[in-house]
Image (cartoon, coloured by chain):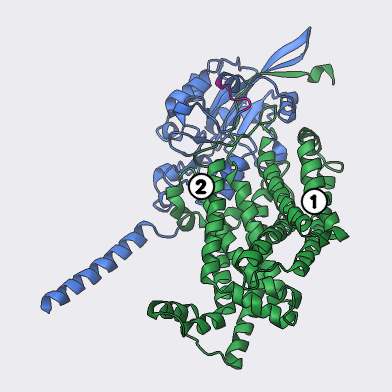
Chain colours: A blue, B green
Amino acid sequence: MSIDKSRRGFLKKSAITSILGVSSAQAFSLKNPGRDAKDPKYIGNKSAHYVMVIDLRQCVGCQACSSACKVENQVPTQQYRTFVNEYELGEFPLVRKAYLPQLCNHCAEPSCVSVCPTGATFKREDGVVVVDSEVCWGCGYCISACPYDKRYFNYETKVADKCTFCAHRVDKGFLPACVETCVGGARVFGNVNDSNSDVAKLLSTFPTDVLKPEQGNKPQVFYIGLDNRIEKVHNATHLLDDIVRKENGALHKEWVKLPKENR
Amino acid sequence: MDMQTIMTTIAAISPARAWGIDVPNYFWFTGSSAAAFIISSFAHVFGFKQFKPIAGFSLLLAFVLLIVAPLNLIDDLKQPGRLVNFFLYGWENFGTSPMKWGVLLLMAYPTLIFFEALILYRAYFVKKIDNAGNFMQKVYKTLAFGRLGLDKENLEKDHRLGFILGAIGIPLALSVHGYTGYILGVVHANVLWYTPLMPVLFLASAMVSGTGLLIVLLPIAQKFFSKARQVDMDMMKRLAVLLSWFIVIDLVIRVLWLSFAMPFGGATREPLYQFFAMHSTMIIYVEYLLCLIVPMMVGFSKLKNYFWIVVSVGFISAVGVWLFRWNTVIGGQEIPRSMPGFMHYIPEIFGQNSIVSVSANWALLIAMLSLIMVIFPWDEEMEDCYKGVNNGKK
């Protein structure tokens, strides 16, 4: 009898302990566990506000930034966090090339963050928009909500992925990989709250533009020398060259289609 | 075109698109569920006795549709094993993420329908207790909440509770589908989706698909599984007329949507013109003409007296709304926003988010509906309603 009682007591205690354990490990959260724990990776540099200035006059379209980003962040084959679109403007003989490096704009009012139903994507206190790949459940709402198409499902991690301004490097005092490698010095990164920073000086010296200001997202990637005709091409509806899709043979396939071995 | 604006994209990358075939199917299921619930409420809440015989059946249909619908969402997830994160985290985005509203709605709405159905059928469960074995007696007692009285007072209480739950259920049904309209309507990045009309548009088209689905399923249930083994043609005609009116409402809202988006539109005008031009055959001839205008004309004409014509227009109107969901969800994502050229989507045949997964979802709907129809004595209730409403005549 006494054994039975002690067993019952043990079972009760274990049940209570396990319930408490589960509830404390997976408690309801307004944010997500990393932010609740004030993990520095989730908070960032509280006194800073990071932005990027891209001087299009310096960009030669070499794609060194695209390559460096892929290596640094282990971005899967045929997926990109940043890419330099290449355009031809005008008609012979009045023709010239134009380049538009694009990456996540780390918007001040990011529409990807506000729609995220799990709190996986959020804005750090230094303005960097990141995704918690442990929390994201892969619903894709952020991908649909981004006006800049700068998010994708990473087919290795199977969650939403995007540029993080190389937050892991920035937190250690390094520059983002794309900035570090930019051969023309077109990409400039820094803390805009610091008036001595290069970005603060550039922003106060040159007129700058952002992509799609009408979306109201307040992008934090600023362009010097942005030709507004390039913006128009985003709304152009002719099916023009798309090197990646052509190479994949995916022009007329499902849009998430990737080579079978990579799925 | 001005020479200076001629542009060629030499290099660009394919942008990612998130949603495939599961999402329009989910929207269709929730919408049809809301419609079936509202048709059921015609009798339970608004007192339209002519719809009483199908109130129970459509309530059960609404329940099953909503039980099966969220599985589309789970299938669409890249990390379905993290479903719990949806419930645990990210509550600070509750106000701005319509998807988050689904946490509450998708739990509250089917629960409410289930309890309403139990109350509606309580008296029938009680009647079954006497002839049931020990185990089933316990089941029926549980389903009847242990309230086993069949006197006038108890029946009135059932009626009152049914009315209250139905009345609460109507805004809930509207919300459960309206929120799906919000999911798309708030996305300002997408020129096709971004309109405050989207929730209303979804609700209006949902009423069409739900009525169409009832027109298809009701005769099957009545002919093969009801007590009388007979199709109520008067009810079919009534539903055909109802369908026509729902189509009128749907068309009015669609005209409002498309007129403000295109002829009177601003920046959205050009891409939308291109989009609708590209899909003109499908949208104008199939979605609008065949699947909306033709069914509407049938309901408003003598053609509604022909059984097979009514069943056919019920079917094509339901299909038409599915195509509308497809053209909205998939079509909206086709429109370019960071590189030129429309995207294309062809669903996979097997695997997650595929034609087979959606077909499996439909198969589950049929299986669940069959199961629910076995558990709930909808046939007896339908028969009693006919005896009461039409003096026993059909």
Nearer to the camera, A82 or A53: A82
Residue annotated with mark 2: B75
Q: Left of A161 or right of it: where is A239?
A: right
Instruction: Classify mark 1: residues with Cα within 10 Å, few (<14), some (14-19) or many (20+).
Output: many
Question: What amino acid type is highlighted by mark number 2?
Answer: Asp
Residue B195 place in picture, x, y as percent = 74, 49
Which dot marks residue B292?
Answer: 1
Q: Chain of mark 1?
A: B
- Element on which disc 2 rests: helix
Determine whether label 2 and label 1 are within 8 Å by CB: no
B287 shown above or below A79 = below
Nearer to the camera, A44 or B107: B107
Nearer to the camera, B55 or B41: B55
Identity of the residue drawn at 60% across and 58% down: B95
Residue B231 place in picture, x, y as percent = 70, 67
Question: What amino acid type is highlighted by mark number 1?
Answer: Leu
Which dot marks residue B158?
Answer: none
